[in-house]
Amino acid sequence: MKILAIHGSPRTIRSNTRRLAALVLEGAADSGAETEMIDLADYHITPCTACEGCSFTGTCVFDDDVPTLTARMQEADAVIFGSPVYIDNISGQMKVFFDRLADAIHYQVLAGKFGCSVATTHESGGDEVVAYLNHVLNYLGVLSVGGFSVATAGKAEHVEDAGPEAQALGRKLAAAVTSGFSDPVQEALIAGNRSYFRAIVEENRDFRPEEYGRWVRMGWIE
Ligand SMILES: Cc1cc2nc3c(=O)[nH]c(=O)nc-3n(C[C@H](O)[C@H](O)[C@H](O)COP(=O)(O)O)c2cc1C
């Protein structure tokens, strides 16, 4: 079982969010998971320019690290998203990454995986950012087992205080991989998204035949 955390703080090893995500990974490791942390700030991710290249050819015009990151998520059984709160939203690093996942969302390349989300903030916006990160997981076809945020009020030790909650979240995520997890509300949302994206896959059947075939095999197209 592989569990991957991806966080969008530019403070890398000094990051509160990275530490919180690491505590979630510790819980997952206790349950036998092989874990990995990705600092998005270490990767070259070009902002989407809406050229629609991926829509027309299946390949992004930019030769950067996004295919590597997508492959790492595909190899994992579960994905943890983490972001610091920046002006009551996710960090720019995280948003630039998400914008580049439009193709992965349309073709549902992570469907069937599990995930969860964490955020840290000085005071405001933590819960909203966790909800948004989980929303993006659902867009990707990933079922979230939950998430939470920590408001540090400038004291990094508050992240350590959240250790038991973070580790419990990691254990819950690992249990979802090994024993399954169900949430009818999210499942309905994911099914609704998939029926919307089906039109894109059908329309592009001739130049994305592998994806069309995968959707047929998955039973998402009859
Ligand atoms: C550009 C920027 C914007 C921020 N915006 C907010 C904010 O809107 N509300 C808040 O309470 N804290 C805000 N913060 C504080 C961070 O969310 C907080 O310090 C967080 O724990 C940083 O996480 P990191 O150490 O993982 O980077 C902001 C910090 C930065 C650098």
Image: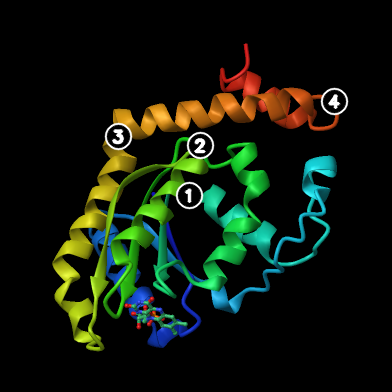
The tag earlier along the polypeptide, 2 or 3, is 2
Residue named by callout 3? 180
Q: CA distance from mark 1 to mark 4?
A: 28 Å
Q: CA distance from mark 3 to mark 1?
A: 20 Å
The quarter in which the C terminus is drawn is: top right
Q: Is residue 174 above or below residue 178?
A: below
The tag earlier along the polypeptide, 3 or 1, is 1
Foreground label between 1 and 4: 1
Q: Is residue 203 above or below residue 9?
A: above
Q: Nearer the viewer, residue 186 or 222?
A: 186
Residue 33 position within the rendered picture, expressed as x and y whole percent measured from the top left: 33, 55
Q: CA distance from mark 4 to mark 3?
A: 35 Å
Residue named by callout 4? 206
Query: How crowded is the residue under tag 1: few (<14 C-alpha within 10 Å), some, or many (20+)?
Result: some
Q: Are marks 1 and 4 in contact (CB under 8 Å)?
A: no
The tag earlier along the polypeptide, 1 or 4, is 1
Residue named by callout 1? 136
Foreground label between 1 and 2: 1
Q: Nearer the viewer, residue 29 or 204?
A: 204
Residue named by callout 2? 111
Identity of the residue drawn at 82% across and 54% down: 51
The tag earlier along the polypeptide, 2 or 4, is 2
Describe the element under mark 4 as helix, strand or loop.
Answer: loop
Does the residue tagged 3 have its C-beta within 8 Å of any atom of ligand 1?
Answer: no
Identity of the residue drawn at 44% across and 65% down: 36
